[in-house]
Image (cartoon, rainbow, N blue to C red):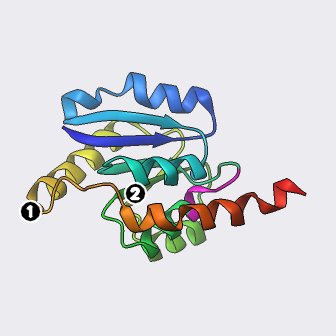
Amino acid sequence: MLKLLIADDEFEIRNGLSEYVPWADMGFEVIGRLGNGLDVLDFVSKHPVDVLLCDIRMPIMSGMDVARELAGQKSPVKIVLLSGYKEFEYAQQALEFGVRSYLLKPPKYSEICGLFGRIKEELLANPHHPSPPNQPLKRSLKKTAAFRLKPYLR
């Protein structure tokens, strides 16, 4: 089973995606449900994750910031961003950070199944699968966390 991490600050969306999509039937195991990007980076630094399904706008650290950080660390995690925004700039910027795809909220069931079917094929064709925890990310996480939390600590 491929390891899927779901991140969205809205409980209903996070829970709905993890509970109502038949991930196991598609070959994915939901290994975590998180509400902000900082928790995502911490989780990815400690656990193997194959795919991250992540909201683009979250408190503390956005999905775009997570994608930027993972790209900077050359993480093998495939990222799919969720957004309520149809703006091209978001999609264009996401591609710069190696984001695999971009789904508009609410995503259609058929879009989820099709996209994750393709991602599964890509990952299983890769001889380096499964991906280990991202160790370089773990080392830089404290610095990133302090930087992101600084405005909230004043």
Region rendered in magenta: 60-65
Q: Position of residue 108 (x, y in %)?
A: 41, 38
For label 2, the SS is strand
Which quarter of the figure has residue 110? top left
Q: Position of residue 43 (x, y in %)?
A: 46, 46
**Residue found 40% across the figure and 49% down from its top:** 46
**Residue found 54% across the figure and 43% down from its top:** 105
Q: Position of residue 96 (x, y in %)?
A: 46, 77
Does 90 appear above or below 113?
A: below
Quarter of the picture holding the N terminus: top left
Tell me if mark 2 has few (under 14), some (14-19) or many (20+) residues whose alpha carbon lies within 10 angstroms of its own. Answer: many
Count the marks.
2
The residue that label 1 is drawn on is 127
Q: Amino acid at mark 1?
A: Pro
- Verify whether residue 64 appears in magenta: yes
Q: What residue occupies the far right of the structure in this picture?
A: 154
Pointers 1 and 2 in contact (C-beta within 8 Å):
no
The residue that label 2 is drawn on is 79
Q: Amino acid at mark 2?
A: Ile
Quarter of the picture holding the C terminus: bottom right
Query: Which of the marked residues, 1 or 2, is nearer the chain's N terminus?
Result: 2
Does 43 appear above or below 127?
A: above
Tell me if mark 1 has few (under 14), some (14-19) or many (20+) residues whose alpha carbon lies within 10 angstroms of its own. Answer: few
Could you say which is closer to the camera, residue 154 or residue 79? 154
**Residue found 50% across the figure and 51% down from its top:** 42
- Find the distance from the CA under tag 1 to the CA under tag 2: 19 Å
- Verify whether residue 26 appears in magenta: no
**Which dot, 1 or 2, sits closer to the camera?**
1
Q: Is residue 20 left or right of residue 150?
A: left
Q: Is residue 83 left or right of residue 148?
A: left
